Amino acid sequence: MVFLGGLGFFGYRMYMGNRVTLFDLPDQLRVTLYASATALIFALVPTRKFWDDLGPQSATIVLWFALISAAAYGFSIVIRRWREY
C-alpha cells in the first residue's frame, strides 16, 4: 500500500510540475494523451487475471495486446506532435 501511495504521489507531483505544458497542448492531443493513459491503466491492472486465470490461448490476450499497442501509439502521436508544436 505504501508503494502504491508513493506511485500516486509521484504521479501527482509530475502532473503538478508539468500542468502548464499539458494545458498548452491542443485539446485533441490532450484527449489523446489522457485516453492513452486510461487504456494503459485498463490493460495493466488486470494483467494477472488475463494471463493466469484465462490461459495464454484466450481471446482476451488479444484485447490486452491491443490496449497496450493503442496506448503506445497514442503516446507516440502526442510526443511527435508536441515536438513539432
Image (cartoon, helix red, strand yellow):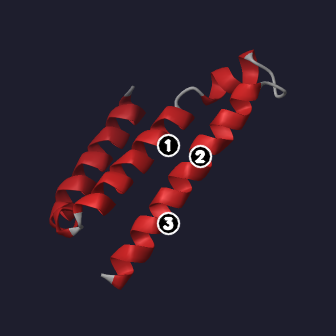
The residue labelled by disc 1 is: 40
Q: Position of residue 78 (x, y in %)?
A: 40, 66
Q: Residues within 10 Å of mark 3 (few under 14, many from 20)?
A: some
For the point 67% across and 42% down, which residue is it?
A: 65
Q: Amino acid at mark 3?
A: Ser
Q: Amino acid at mark 1?
A: Leu
Q: Are marks 1 and 2 in contact (CB under 8 Å)?
A: yes
For the point 47% across and 58% down, which residue is it?
A: 74
- Where on the picture, by quarter, is residue 2? top left
* Dot placed on the residue nearer the N-terminal end, 3 or 1: 1
Q: Are marks 2 and 3 in contact (CB under 8 Å)?
A: no
- Where on the picture, by quarter, is residue 54? top right
- Say what secondary structure mark 1 lies in: helix
- What numbered label is drawn on residue 68? 2
For the point 29% across and 59% down, which residue is it?
A: 28
Instruction: Choose between 47 and 12: the one closer to the eye.
Output: 47
* Dot placed on the residue nearer the N-terminal end, 2 or 3: 2
Distance Cα–Cα, label 3 vs label 1: 13 Å
Q: Amino acid at mark 2?
A: Ile
Residue pushed farthest right? 57
Instruction: Choose between 66 and 55: the one closer to the eye.
Output: 66
Instruction: Choose between 38 and 49: the one closer to the eye.
Output: 38
- Say what secondary structure mark 2 lies in: helix
Judge left or right: residue 1 versus residue 70: left
Picture quarter with the N terminus: top left
Judge left or right: residue 9 versus residue 32: left
- What numbered label is drawn on residue 25? none
Picture quarter with the C terminus: bottom left
